[in-house]
Image (cartoon, rainbow, N blue to C red):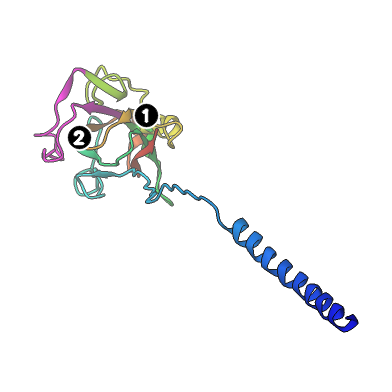
Amino acid sequence: MRTRSTGVRSLLVAAVPVGLVFSAAVVWQSTAAAFTATTDNSGNTWQTGSVVLTDNDGGSALFSSALDSGLKPGSARSECIRVDYTGSLAASIKLYVTTPTSGTVALDPYLVMSVEQGQNVTSATTVAPDCSSGFTSTSTATFLYNTKVASDPLANQAATMTALKSAAHDYSTGLTVGTAVAQNTSLTFKITYSVKDDNNAQNAQSMASFVWEARNN
């Protein structure tokens, strides 16, 4: 009888750990099981806009010694240009004038200048450099600089190249061409000079760069 009792106890003792292992396995499986759900927002992309400004003369000079040499008091000439804004962002455009590196300015005080902005056109409009076609004044002439065309005797004689370079020499001080200019807008301009009747203007030369700059709003 003693031997049989010992055997039964051994079976019971062995059964306890097995039962614990089985019970732990059931608990782990129950813990691992769960309801789930997900949502996402895929395919995100980003694209910047653009600011693009070109002109119809391909970056060449409006005035040059080929046509603007041997000048004398009263000599005057106008040049016209089309400036195209094709950027996707609305932009503010300004015009300013600088002196090229190592450029001369001796004639600046004796050049009366005017800048007139004409009617907008299409990018297909041919604006002749000599202003014979493509440039049309607004209903009331829009002068960005001076009060009349420089060659007009009633033009402001103090509106010289010297004064222009001083007043509008970078974007912050530039002449405002337009604000919130939309994509595919073509602007036109007429720039005119006239030589003052001043003996000090003899044998003098000047150089300048006309710069149109656009910045998005």
Q: Residue furthest bottom?
A: 3
> Tag 1: residue type?
Leu
Position of 71 relative to 156 (above/below):
below
Between 74 and 51, the one lying in front of the other is 51
**Does 204 sit left or right of 40 as displayed?**
left
- x 43%, y 29%: residue: 167
**Mark 1 / mark 2, whichever is N-terminal:** 2
Do the numbered discs 1 and 2 sit on residues whose CB atoms are within 8 Å?
A: no
- x 35%, y 32%: residue: 110
> Tag 2: residue type?
Arg
| Residue 77 - label | 2
Percent position of residue 111, x then y:
32, 33
As helix, strand or loop, the secondary structure at mark 2 comes to strand
Q: How far is mark 1 from mark 2, CA to CA?
A: 21 Å
Percent position of residue 150, x then y:
26, 26
Mark 1 neighbour density, 10 Å: few (under 14) some (14–19) many (20 or more): many
Position of 115 relative to 106 (above/below):
above
**Does 173 sit left or right of 179 as displayed?**
right
Instruction: Specify the principal SS of the magenta part.
Output: loop
Q: Residue furthest front?
A: 1
Q: Identify residue for label 1.
A: 175
Q: Quadrant of the C terminus?
A: top left
Between 12 and 116, the one lying in front of the other is 12
Percent position of residue 203, x then y:
33, 43
Q: Which residues are magenta?
A: 112-140
Position of 82 relative to 103 (above/below):
above
Mark 2 neighbour density, 10 Å: few (under 14) some (14–19) many (20 or more): some
Q: Quadrant of the N terminus?
A: bottom right
Between 19 and 84, the one lying in front of the other is 19
